Image (cartoon, rainbow, N blue to C red):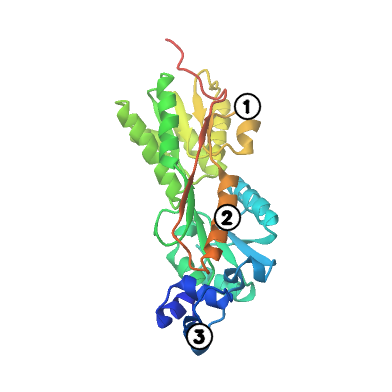
Amino acid sequence: MTIITIKDVAARAGVSPKTVSRVINGESYVRAELREAVQKVVDELGYRPNAFARGLSSSRSFLIGLFFDDPASGYAADIQRGALTRCRALSYHLVIEQIEPDRADWLEQCDATLRVVRLGGAILTPPLCDLPELLDLLDQHQVPVVRIAPGDFPGRTPRVHMDDYGAAREMTVRLVAMGHRDIAFIQGNPTHHAAARRFEGFCAAMTEAGLAVADTWVLQGDFSFRSGLEAAELLLGHSNRPTAVFAGNDEMALAVLVVAMRHGIAVPEQLSVAGFDDAPIARMAWPQLTTVRQPNAEMGSTAVDLLMRAQVSGGDAIATECQLPYALIMRPSTAPVPAD
């Protein structure tokens, strides 16, 4: 069955989606003849407006879906906390949905869920935010979407992100300023656009400093502690090792600390370690981790606010970009290279 959207009504009536929204919501500043013409198209097409798109005045019981591939991660928990706090302040309800893109039937399962659970909006996190099939499905169900840290389709939906490239570059510059020349990097999940941007920032800073990026000191991880252990063993399991390791997130950086302790390598006296995120484990580790503070909770709350803006536009998602600031957090896991 074809789902009629507000854009379909607007195209048939020869008006903007915002005008259609005004007619549906009974707003007074629409000419009588225009209102009649739009309403006729609404009736002809059998358009049923999304309650979310009709405005806060029509109902206070709305559901917002927050989509993750791994809802158990620390990253997911921080975003969920920010989104939940903002939803509560606005009298909305947050629904956590897990999608596993590796499953052959993931799209069918998601479609079935959307037919049962009527969402007023959806927040997509990496790597789900770059799945065109999911974006198309949400469009078909007339669900406004905001994406967190997407890499593709920049003008398709509102998006929230931070400057992963600039943050990684700045952290690398700080390590170089400490005298480090042999710096290794552990990359994050290759399906996440942010992971690639962090590596690009690292490479840019190394090149600017006239330093080579050694292939043997660039290891592929996937943001998990396990992948950090495997990469750290390859980096630290022999005498020719770097003086600093910059990991693409805090979980992998924590794994580097564990492997360094296993091999009797003192941190930061013999090895500096930096991470990314400023997750709670960064402060629980010993020594505490130098890291980049990523505004995960703020991205979650900002995504909710952008959905509210899409709602005001009558469900017609406006391409809005919001970049939030990061901060370098220097802790005892990094130190200047000791003098020979």
Q: Nearer the viewer, residue 296 or 90?
A: 90
Q: Amino acid at mark 3?
A: Glu
Quadrant housing residue 118? bottom right
Classify mark 2: residues with Cα within 10 Å, few (<14), some (14-19) or many (20+): some
Q: Mark 2 touching mark 3, by CB under 8 A?
A: no
Q: Which residue is mark 1?
A: 286
* Disc 3, SS: helix
Q: Which residue is mark 3?
A: 36
Query: What number of labels is visible?
Result: 3
Q: Where 130 sits versus 212, above or below?
A: below
Q: Quadrant of the C terminus?
A: top left
Q: Nearer the viewer, residue 145 or 255?
A: 145
Q: CA distance from mark 3 to mark 1?
A: 69 Å
Q: Which residue is mark 2?
A: 305
Mark whose residue sits in front, 1 or 2: 2
**Residue 16 at what x, y percent from top left?**
43, 73
User: Which sits earlier in the primary sequence, circle 1 or circle 2?
Assistant: 1
